[in-house]
Amino acid sequence: MKAVKSKITKALPVGAVLDATDNSGARTIKIISVRGYKTRTRKLQSAGIADMIHATVLTGKPDMKHKVVPCVVVRQRKEFTRPEGTKVKFEDNAAIVLKDIKLGLPKGSMIKGPIAKEVAIRWPAVAKIANMIL
């Protein structure tokens, strides 16, 4: 997993509800923790673009519902700044479900909608199945 050079705003705290934008069987997910996030006492963990999260599936196929799954955030509404100074924001908050945490392999075989360039740099296996990278 490579480092992201952009100044990513951490806009998705624990408890945020996101759309699952792949064909893994999940529709909406809720963040329960952010992997690798260190915080002080009583401060909520929060995630941004290209962060790995653990989430529970709220709606989707019956075999996926109420499962805890690892995910990667691919879109967020709150704008973030890239190193060249451009500001980027998306229409919705979205994530994709992973099946292997160490290799970053996605569970689904396609991603609906665009993903951020920072996700493609950090997670190359996710970039392979994306149809649009912004």
Image: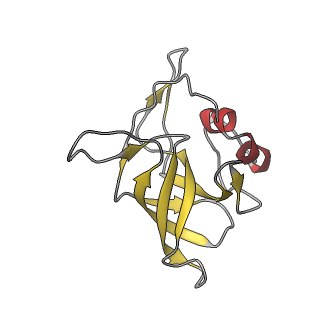
Q: Position of residue 51 (x, y in %)?
A: 52, 43
Q: Is residue 132 left or right of residue 68?
A: right
Q: Is 129 above or below relative to 108?
A: above
**Residue at coordinates 61% horizontally, 83% vertically from top-left?**
63
**Residue at coordinates 43% horizontally, 34% vertically from top-left?**
79
Please name the colour scheme applied to the rendered image: secondary structure
Where residue 96 sits, quadrant-wise, is bottom right
Q: Residue 107 or 18: which is nearer the viewer?
A: 107
Which residue lies most toward the left here? 42
Which residue lies most toward the top here? 84
**Residue at coordinates 49% horizontally, 58% vertically from top-left?**
54
Q: Is 86 above or below relative to 90?
A: above
**Residue at coordinates 62% horizontally, 39% vertically from top-left?**
119
Q: Is residue 122 left or right of residue 7?
A: right
Q: Is residue 38 left or right of residue 84?
A: left
Quadrant where the C terminus is found in the figure: top right
Quadrant where the N terminus is found in the figure: top right
Q: Position of residue 22 (x, y in %)?
A: 66, 61
- How many marks the image carries: the answer is 0
Q: Is 41 above or below relative to 84?
A: below
Q: Position of residue 2 (x, y in %)?
A: 63, 30
Q: Position of residue 9 (x, y in %)?
A: 40, 33
